[in-house]
Image: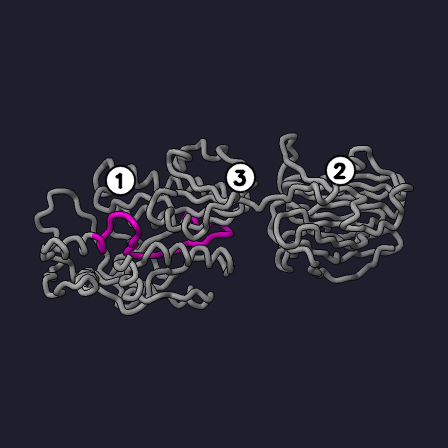
Amino acid sequence: MTEFGKRLRATETPIPGLVLWDLTVHGDSRGWFKENWQREKMIAAGLPDFGPVQNNISFNDAVGTTRGIHAEPWDKWVSLATGRVFGVWVDLREGPTFGMVFTAELDPSRAIFVPRGVGNGYQTLDPDTAYTYLVNDHWSPDATYTFLNLADESVAIDWPIPLDRAEISEKDHAHPRLADVEPVPARKILVTGANGQLGRALRAELGDASHIDYVTREDLDLASPEVFTARHWRDYDTIINAAAYTAVDQAETPEGRREAWAANATAVSHLARIALEHRLTLVHVSTDYVFDGTSDRPYHEDDPLSPLGVYGQTKAAADAIVATVPRHYIVRTSWVIGDGRNFVRTMRELADRGVDPAVVDDQVGRLTFTGDLARGIVHLMAERPAPGVYNLTGGGDPMSWADVARAVFVSTGHDPQRVRPVSTEEYFASASAPVAPRPRNSVLDLSKIEATGFAVRAVEDVLREYLAH
């Protein structure tokens, strides 16, 4: 019998992501009423905002009708309009809980959220039972299902009505035993800009697992409208956007301006739309160039954006776009150093060749090594703190570019006095091509990401490691 008057409440189960819910049902002599799906209240109570797009109803005439066990490629919100069922859920996802079982009785006052890849089955306990479920992807004949036999001995489900007396389809009778079930793979991660310095560092950090896709512009043109259908995006959980146009001076030219806006804004708007429509997490890398550098303190994540040049303007536009995605992380960084051509390598080569460089000393910031940047991105993906902007650079005292050059000279056994400090204006005085304006203060406050448990490493220590290898 349906229980009236319960408060909306969630109960975790041993299967990760499978959550049993008590629903509030109002009843009297005429019958009853409930809010079977109420997005605002249920999300506030902890239900994932899973974005249902289709509602299905399975009507069952007789007691003992038994269906399952089916794992589908979408999330489900299961509830009853009439009757009762004995529900069975088996984790068929790859991982340590593969094969774990949970059972519960459902009536109109109880519902359950079933995540993708968890096998679902039930047996009716009342006649005329209406079993309903919301799903967050449209049914497709091309969808991939995973099945488990209702009578599997290893999960040993204690069905209220023995299966030899139950109503079961021939198709459900023929499903494989657990030992023959291929686990449902994890949702995928897409890493763009795979051949860039950060992309290579992310590959080193994440590895080459089968659920991680690394793509370049040749593989996937993010600025093309065709990107919306280039993947079955429901198979993905996260996009890490490590692709960007970073030629800050070239961006000040007519051709460079077009390329910068296409790569840094149009492409990002496409990724944001994909993330919105398919409930994905979007991780995007931002830059100190979204600020004008006039602050007399380190920049916080919520400081107003005020970019000086085209590159900074395109990146600021991207930040605003990505912030519209509910599940987003904007990782704002500065002065990135990786395994390709960069400032540190250039200074080392000049030192070894006996060249005494003139280096700017009125721009101040902190280096960020791509290994640490990749490590920070993976940390955010694992910890899942509140969505938003997170500053992520190297730690320690801020340095000018001239200070960095001197540190390189010292670490490689050369006289740091060979580095001649100059102003930005002096350095670019003879330039014949357009020069982008640079922020003079690029120091970012790191307290927010440190509060998530991420250990920021001092620039001086990482620089020595980098040069040693």
Q: Which residue is under mark 2?
A: 175
Q: Which residue is under mark 3?
A: 233
Q: How far apart are marks 3 and 2 (CA)?
A: 28 Å
Amino acid, disc 2: His
Tell whether 243 sits left or right of 464. right
Residue 109 lies in quadrant: bottom right
- Pick the quarter of the image with the C terminus: bottom left
Q: Tell which circle, 1 or 3, labels the residue nearer the N-terminal end.
A: 3
Q: Tell which circle, 2 or 1, labels the residue nearer the N-terminal end.
A: 2
Query: In what element is the residue under mark 1?
Result: helix
- Magenta part of the protein: which range? 321-345
Q: Which residue is under mark 1?
A: 257
Q: Relative to residue 441, is residue 87 depicted above or below?
A: above
Q: Tell which circle, 3 or 2, labels the residue nearer the N-terminal end.
A: 2
In the rendered image, residue 89, in percent from the top left (x then y), is placed at: 73, 50
Give the camera-side residue of 111 and 378: 378
Mark 1 vs 3: CB contact within 8 A: no
In the rendered image, residue 26, in percent from the top left (x then y), is placed at: 80, 56
For the question of whether residue 276 can be seen, the reply is no
